[in-house]
């Protein structure tokens, strides 16, 4: 028995969200799936119910960033010099192949254990965060570390969000690789103190390692990490032409409507 690993590939923001939702909708007929991906062009993704000030929209467009609405909740994430993951599986009670707990927090811990094991491939010991009451009032996902996120020495290393449909679960999230500390605050119009080790907004994986990583190195580390956490092999199986064509039909749902979705 094995589960599916979809290796790193890049798509625009709407297509990436459509692929994640397509995999979620087919989860009841599929083995669990781990997918790695990037955004081309770079993209600002916002939570399902989040609104953006017009000034932020204009700044993002001026920098060449697309804007997309995620099907999941949470706050704004800048997909630029980052790695994004998605994990799709069924709840234990909903499918013979179900593996995830029905409790949202318990399922987060299960999936984040896969991320933690992946970081351990690089000898990094990431820890789960804790709930912060002020999180919902923040526009920026990486300004708070909740129990759905991972941090290293207090600096957020991975931010995640979940979407559930008919007993199936999608968790996806962003891992900064070499993202400058001030770009997201600039987009949001937030004044940022001069970055020190104590005030840095987020952790960058490449900075922590002291080197960059190839796509193959990231594919290998996350596949091995999730295999270790769930005690099962992940076999590489890229997206099929049929899946890509089906996702293209869904992509329009996630494109940003400036007039309807600005504050």
Image (cartoon, rainbow, N blue to C red):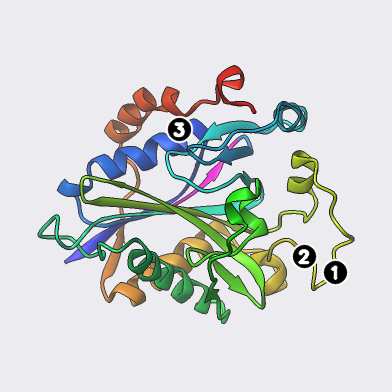
Q: Which residue is mark 1?
A: 196
> Is residue 12 something that shows in the picture?
no
Q: Which of the two marks, 3 or 1, is nearer to us in this view?
A: 1
Q: Is residue 15 left or right of residue 131?
A: left
Please identify the quarter of the rendering in which residue 5 is found: bottom left
Q: Is residue 247 magenta?
A: no
Q: Is residue 47 left or right of residue 56?
A: left
Q: Nearer the viewer, residue 258 or 16?
A: 258
| Label 3 element class | helix
**Mark 2 and mark 1: Cα distance apart in space:** 6 Å
**Mark 3 and mark 2: Cα distance apart in space:** 31 Å
Identity of the residue furthest to the left in this view:
96
For image coordinates 46% across by 61% down, the residue present is 219
Q: Are marks 2 and 1 in contact (CB under 8 Å)?
A: yes
Q: Which mark is residue 200?
A: 2
Q: Is residue 38 magenta?
A: yes
Query: Which callout, 3 or 2, points at the residue further toward the start of the chain?
Result: 3
Query: Which callout, 3 or 1, points at the residue further toward the start of the chain?
Result: 3
Number of marks in picture = 3
For image coordinates 38% across by 26% down, the residue present is 248
| Label 2 element class | loop
> Is residue 100 something that shows in the picture?
yes
Instruction: State which quarter of the image contains the N terminus.
Output: bottom left
Q: Is residue 95 above or below residue 50?
A: below
Q: Nearer the viewer, residue 41 or 180?
A: 180
Q: Which mark is residue 15?
A: 3
For image coordinates 30% across by 43% down, the residue present is 23
Q: What's drawn in magenta, residue-wise?
A: 35-40
- Within 10 Å of disc 2 (Cα), the crowding (few <14, some 14-19, many 20+) is some
For image coordinates 51% across by 25% down, the residue present is 255
Q: Is residue 193 left or right of residue 146?
A: right
| Label 1 element class | loop
């Amino acid at each position: 028995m094995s589960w599916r690993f979809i290796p790193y590939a890049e798509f625009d923001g709407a297509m990436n969200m459509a692929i994640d939702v397509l995999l979620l909708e087919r989860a009841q007929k599929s083995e669990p799936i781990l997918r790695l991906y990037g955004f081309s062009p770079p993209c600002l993704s916002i939570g399902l119910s989040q609104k953006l000030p017009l000034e932020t929209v204009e700044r993002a467009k001026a920098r060449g960033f697309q804007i997309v609405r995620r099907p999941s909740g949470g706050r704004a994430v800048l997909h630029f010099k980052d790695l994004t993951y998605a994990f799709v599986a069924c709840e234990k009670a909903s499918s013979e192949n179900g593996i995830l707990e029905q409790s949202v927090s318990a399922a987060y811990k299960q999936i984040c254990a896969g991320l933690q094991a992946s970081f351990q491939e690089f000898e990094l010991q990431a820890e789960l965060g804790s709930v912060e009451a002020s999180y919902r009032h923040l526009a920026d996902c990486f300004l708070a570390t909740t129990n759905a996120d991972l941090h290293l020495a207090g600096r957020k290393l991975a931010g995640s969000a979940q979407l559930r449909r008919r007993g199936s679960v999608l968790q996806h999230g962003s891992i900064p690789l070499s993202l400058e500390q001030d770009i997201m605050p600039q987009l949001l119009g937030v004044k940022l103190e001069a970055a020190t080790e104590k005030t840095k907004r987020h952790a960058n994986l490449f900075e922590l390692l002291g080197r960059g990583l190839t796509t193959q190195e990231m594919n290998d580390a996350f596949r091995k990490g999730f295999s270790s956490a769930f005690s099962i092999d992940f076999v590489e199986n890229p997206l099929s032409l049929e899946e890509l064509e089906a996702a293209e039909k869904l992509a329009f749902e996630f494109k940003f409507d400036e007039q309807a979705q600005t504050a």
